[in-house]
Image: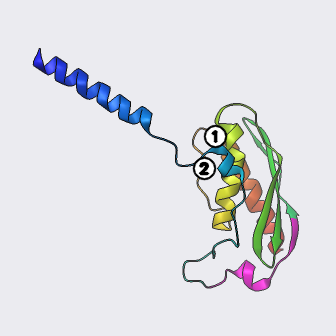
Amino acid sequence: MKRAIAATTATVAGLFLMLALKPHQTPAAAAAPPAGPAPSASPSGVPSPRERDGTSGTFTGDTIDTARGPVQVRVTLVKGRLTTITALKGEHDEGASADAVPRLTQKALAAQSAKIDAVSGATFTSQGYISSLQSALDRAHD
C-alpha cells in the first residue's frame, strides 16, 4: 500500500511539473524578425562567400510540391546578407504547419543559410521550405 501511495504521489508531482513548464518562445515572438544586424554566418567572423561577393537583390525559389501543398519562398539579400524571407506559398492554417513558416524564417535568418532544422510536426512544410530557400539562394549565386 505504501508503494502505491508513493508511486501515485510521484506521478502527480511529475505531471504537475511537466504541465507547469512554459514554452521557450511564443509564436508571436517567432514571427518577429531578429532585431539589429544578423549574426555572422561563421563563428570565426570570416565572411561567407556570399558576403564577400556582396550579392544584392530579390530571388524566388522553386515551388516545391509536398503532401501538405506547394511551398515557395522569395528571399532578399543586401550585400550578401539574407535580410528577408517571404513565403509565397505554403502558409497552412492547421496544426503545427501554421506556426512552421515563421519559425523556419527565424531560423534561416539567424543561420543566414538554408541549413536549418525542420519544425517538429511540420515535416513536409519544413522540407519544402528548406528546398525552396536553397534554390533561391542558389539563384543568387548564378
Q: Measuring 73% from the left and 35% from the top, which residue is drawn there?
A: 68
Residue 117 sits in which quadrant? bottom right
Find numbered disc 2 in the image and state the secondary structure of the residue it sits on: loop
Q: Which residues are magenta?
A: 46-58
Q: Nearer the viewer, residue 3 or 13?
A: 13
Picture layout, residue 56 above or below residue 32: below
The colour scheme is rainbow
Q: Which residue is mark 2?
A: 118
Question: Would you say residue 127 is visible in this rendering?
Answer: no
Labels 1 and 2 touching (C-beta < 8 A)? yes
Q: Measuring 24% from the left and 21% from the top, which residue is drawn there?
A: 8
Estimate the x, y position of residue 81 in percent, counting from the top left.
Answer: 75, 74
Residue 8 sits inside the magenta stretch: no
- Is the N terminus in the top left, top right, bottom left or bottom right quadrant? top left
Question: What crowding class fits label 2: few (fewer than 14 Cα within 10 Å), some (14-19), or many (20 or more)?
Answer: some
The amino acid marked with disc number 1 is: Ala
Q: Residue furthest top?
A: 1
Q: Residue furthest left?
A: 2
Residue 54 sits inside the magenta stretch: yes
From the viewer's perspective, is 4 left or right of 123? left
The amino acid marked with disc number 2 is: Ala
From the viewer's perspective, is 142 left or right of 6? right
Estimate the x, y position of residue 41 in percent, counting from the top left.
Answer: 63, 74
Q: Which residue is mark 1?
A: 122
Picture layout, residue 89 above or below residue 40: above
Q: Measuring 52% from the left and 48% from the top, which residue is drawn there?
A: 24
